[in-house]
Image (spheres, helix red, strand yellow):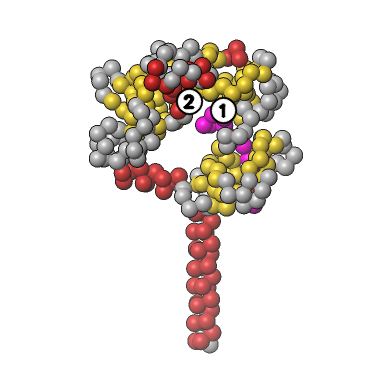
Amino acid sequence: MHSGKKLLLITVAGLMLLLQSANTAFAQEKPPFIGKINGDNINIRADSTVSSEAICNVDKGQSLEVVSESYEWYKVKLPKNAPSFIKKNLVSVIENKADNTLGTNSAAQIRTAVVAGDKVNIRLHPSESSPILGQVNKNEVINILQDREAWFKIEPIDNSFGWINKKFVTRGTGTKQEITDKDKVTAPPELPQENVTIEGIISPYGMVIKRPATHKLITSDKKIFLLTGNKKSLDALNYHKVRITGKIISPSREKYPVIEIKILETAD
């Protein structure tokens, strides 16, 4: 009888340990995290159902940022090959200021626009009945790829999303929390760890070895910040006053803080 009770206790303890391990593993799989695609020609869809319209395809080994989940689906940030459209009458194309450091033809090759209203929809096709992929707000900067009658085809914005079935995604080694923790270790202790918003004048910084920054921002009180982000957008806004929101990612030994841009807006 004693041995039977002992065996029962061991069995219950083993079951509890197994459940605890399963719960831990399940919790670790919760978004946000960086996932890798485990198949070829996999659809990212406009909604979390197989009957919803496909936005674009991704292939094996491609990384995607998973931001949330719903049953058997992950919500992901759209990759660069995703089609995205915005109505022309809701943006204003930027007239680039001269920049001799970029070469004679560089400015003509850059087509960048500023959003003219709040909560402007980005759509899958050049049609107001097309699925909404995301939204942009007034003064945010977008890059134009093509003209489509009353629409511009643009590069996907940072907050445009689609859905992919969980079975096609394998969790990567890096997570958003791990990335955040890394930034907290390397950033100067006196600098903010969350997103910062700063205004100033953008100008080219040039290529510096082992530094991702391509531009600098000088504030009204002469503070200097180095910027890393979409170079095409930054080039188009050289010598303009801008408002940037982003995260300081520079190590403490750097003379000037480096900001990874999340939102770029004009402030002229």
Please state which amino acid type lies under the numbered disc 2.
Answer: Lys
Question: Mark 2 highlights which residue?
Answer: 232
Question: Of 255 and 90, which appears nearest the observer?
Answer: 255
- Whole-number angstrom distance, CA of label 2 to CA of label 1: 11 Å
Q: Position of residue 214 (x, y in %)?
A: 38, 29
Compared to 109, does 49 lie above or below? below
Which residues make up the magenta segment? 155-167
Q: Position of residue 263 (x, y in %)?
A: 45, 27
* Side (left or right) of 71 relative to 255: right
At x 54% / y 84%, what residue is drawn?
A: 4
At x 37% / y 24%, what residue is drawn?
A: 204
Sort mark 1 into few (<14), some (14-19) or many (20+) by Cα contacts within 10 Å.
Answer: some
Magenta stretch holds residue 170? no
Question: Mark 1 highlights which residue?
Answer: 155
Please state which amino acid type lies under the numbered disc 1.
Answer: Glu
Comes first in the chain, label 2 or label 1: 1
At x 53% / y 23%, what residue is drawn?
A: 143
How many marks the image carries: the answer is 2
At x 51% / y 73%, what residue is drawn?
A: 14
Kindly state the secondary structure of the residue where label 2 is placed: helix
Residue 266, image quadrant: top left
Query: Nearer the observer, disc 2 or disc 1?
Result: 2
Sort mark 2 into few (<14), some (14-19) or many (20+) by Cα contacts within 10 Å.
Answer: some
Tag 2–tag 1 contact (CB < 8 Å): yes
